[in-house]
Amino acid sequence: MRREKEDYSVCCVYLKMQKNNEPALKREIGATALALNGINLTIGAGIFVLPAIVSENLGPASFIAYLLCGLLVILIMLCFAEVGSRITTTGGAYAYVENAFGPLAGFLMNTLFWFGFCCLSDAAVINVLTDMIAIWLPAFSIPYARVIFFTAVYGLLCVINIRGVKHGSAFAVTATILKLTPLILLVLIGLFSISPHNLVIKTWPGIKNIGETSLVLFFAFMGTESALSVSGEIKNPKKNIPKGIFMAITGILLMYLLIQFVSLGVLGDQLSTFKDAPLASLASKLIGPVGGTIILITSVVSMLGMLSGDILATPRILFAASKDKLLPEFLGRVHPRFATPYWSIIVYCGVGLIFASSGGFKQLAVLASSSVLIIYLAVVLATIRLRYKKDIAEKGSFKIPGGLIIPILATITIGWFLSHITKDEIKGFAVFFVLLTVIYFLRKGFKKKEDSSS
């Protein structure tokens, strides 16, 4: 999962700059840089804990869930590649959906992104972080101690990011550099210690079990699309966007399969018992206590970096929405000394704290995965819609071969994934969208009255 997500609010600002003929963004990002950014934004907290959850449900057949998630991501990213090569302005999914279906759809997806995706993902990640720290300090398993820790982390990162963008971005970049190297080394060492009998499939899992597990696992595949939020800065986007996406997905899927393969091959049935820190347990068996400690520290730093990156970027969405009069005015206030949207940061951290305190990783991961699947579904439908919009340029753009087969397959697959969420979760999403729609039209009405009076 990624979790230094690109800031959609900045995207909105960039779009406005272009409309107002202000200095344009420079196209300096190539296919390789795009691919590496997509890998970085995706591989994060989820992979440090999900191998055990997947193994518990599917055992040696775990690869099925990874391949299903990988297949879905490939189908979705093919749609992203097509629509991204046609809508080359900065904004990613938000820009694609808005161009296809209008400002209401863009507003719904934008809000779902910062709340359902970012906020719930952060809440899930901080629960995993606390579970790992509890291995060293068992007191962190006590509910009230967890809430105190959540408050301290959100409070610290809130202060860091209010004090200035420089402090927040430096912390996130450092964490990113530290997280990938130990994982690659762990895989390379583990390949020589696999026991083949641990990989023998004795009983094939049922379809329902595969679906439910895949929905949780999809949490680790979220994030590649966020690299496209900088579409306005990609060189030759019609060529480099498809190429960069395919390179990223290939690298991510290969990395995940190798991690699961090595974890299961070395630990066997014991893997499912190490739910709090499966990769740390794997490192301990391969290298000794030092290896486990290194992976634990890497996990903690990676998650803190992801949280800091989100708290740096995502509140800007609230800030931009406030400036557009879609959210309360106070969210658009800038700190007089530090020049940061301090109220947006405070509110975002407060909402994240509430959800982190009310649920565990698995529950929050399902909600976050469901939210991003809805966003993906909107982009897939936007791909179909934009094929029939004559005002969107097609010349030189990438087009998925096979007509509408890929978008339709993507729609069906997303629908199958979403069919495994509970009825209560479906009702929750329905209420969420109804409320957002009401808020949108109320704000639009107020804005129209203000414009008329002025």
Image: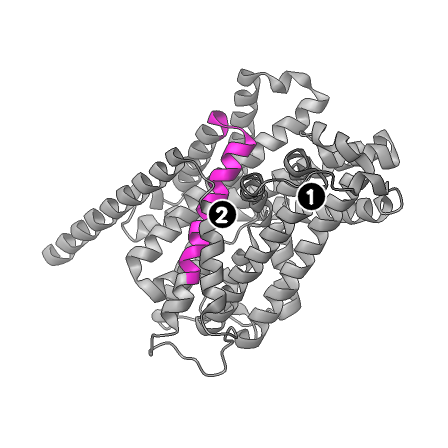
Real-space Cα separation, disc 1 to disc 2, in angstroms: 18 Å
In the structure shown, which secondary structural element does the residue marked by tag 2 occupy? helix
Front-lying residue, 249 or 210: 210
Q: Quadrant of residue 30?
A: bottom right
Q: Amino acid at mark 2?
A: Phe
Give coordinates of residue 423: x percent, y percent: 38, 35
Give coordinates of residue 120: x percent, y percent: 48, 38
User: In this picture, which residue range is highlighted in magenta?
Assistant: 356-380
Quadrant that contains the C terminus: bottom left
Which residue is at 79% across, 44% downward?
A: 262
Q: On the image, numbered disc 1 is attached to which residue?
A: 61
- The verdict on residue 147 being magenta is no
User: Is 445 on the left-hand or right-hand side of 332?
Assistant: left
- The verdict on residue 371 being magenta is yes
Q: Quadrant of residue 194?
A: top right
Camera sees residue 131: yes
Q: Is residue 188 above or below residue 394?
A: above
Which residue is at 71% across, 27% downward?
A: 273
User: Is 120 on the left-hand or right-hand side of 289?
Assistant: left
In the structure shown, which secondary structural element does the residue marked by tag 1 occupy? helix
Camera sees residue 338: no
Q: On the image, numbered disc 2 is attached to which residue?
A: 417
User: Is 214 on the left-hand or right-hand side of 297?
Assistant: left
Q: Residue furthest left?
A: 453
Front-lying residue, 446 or 285: 285
